[in-house]
Amino acid sequence: MKRLNRRQGMVLLLVCAAVLLAAVTVAGILLEPRAMQADFSRTNRTPCAEYPFGTDWMGRDMLARTLAGLSLSIRIGLLTAAASALIALVLGIAAATLGRKADAAVSYCIDMIMGIPHILLVMLISIACGRGFTGVVAGVALSHWTSLARVIRGEVMQLRQAPYILVARKLGVPQGKIIRKHLLPHLLPQFLTGLILLFPHAILHEASVTFLGFGLPSEQPAIGVILSESMQYLTTGRWWLALFPGLMLILVVVLFAVSGEQVRRLLDPASVHE
């Protein structure tokens, strides 16, 4: 049997992580009606074969609620990470190509946003946007673009001095065409890596803000809502209400982090010969 080389192993690990995340997302969507279903004849059951994650004080299946909450968190993470990455791409390129004033303005915004604790900033934006789904998406998307924008700005600053860029400018090639034809292809690895690595941050901050009561409404089976509600029952010995949702949240975050690291290594030119 042929042994996989290191690069093929990274691809296999990335595919496995993507399949698991997709399975959790689809399962959560399919189980959402069951997650909302209450049955007071089965309240507070400990984990068993029929209910692997147990049931809560309303008889709701905690496995279904956990998967539904994770699915919602993943979808919010995808949306907010994509929005943040696009903001970072646009502002990073603008800072490096539109002159000193644009660079100073973007750098000031980055410093200002990074100077405020993420959780506090997400909460403030969420409240300003009316909380709920829209508030959480706006809060996370508008607060997580700064680090990637700095990376892209620095990369574009280096690319501006490349010989082929200088020749293109001398030949009168429009700035927009230089960005499309020369800068964007070189920025793709950094953009994809930053996009994937934004997912775990987005998911954790969405869950944290919802846990504190400034995010998604309590009627939605979100992980933050599940963990927040379970806190008042831990002292009564119902440990499974928080343990399994918390572990599943950590698993999803780790899978996204592993995926981002594998994408970074795969896009690294040095890994081609591994």
Image (cartoon, grey):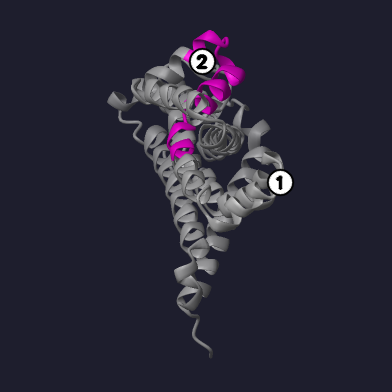
- 90, above or below 20, in the image: above
Please state the extent of the stretch shown in magenta in the rendering.
125-150
Residue 252 pos. (x, y %): 48, 46
Residue 147 painted magenta = yes
Dot placed on the residue nearer the N-terminal end, 1 or 2 = 2
Q: Which numbered marker is on residue 126?
A: 2
Q: Nearer the viewer, residue 126 or 99?
A: 99
Residue with the most extreme front position? 170
Q: Is residue 4 rendered to the left or right of residue 114?
A: right
Q: Residue at x 55, y 31 (%)?
A: 91
Q: Secondary structure at mark 2?
A: helix
Residue 40 pos. (x, y %): 55, 24
Residue 14 painted magenta = no
From mark 1 to mark 2, how far is it between C-alphas?
43 Å
Q: Residue at x 49, y 23 (%)?
A: 101
Q: Which numbered marker is on residue 173?
A: 1
Residue 236 pos. (x, y %): 30, 25
Residue 242 pos. (x, y %): 38, 33
The picture quadrant where one finds residue 117 is top left
- 25, above or below 87, in the image: below
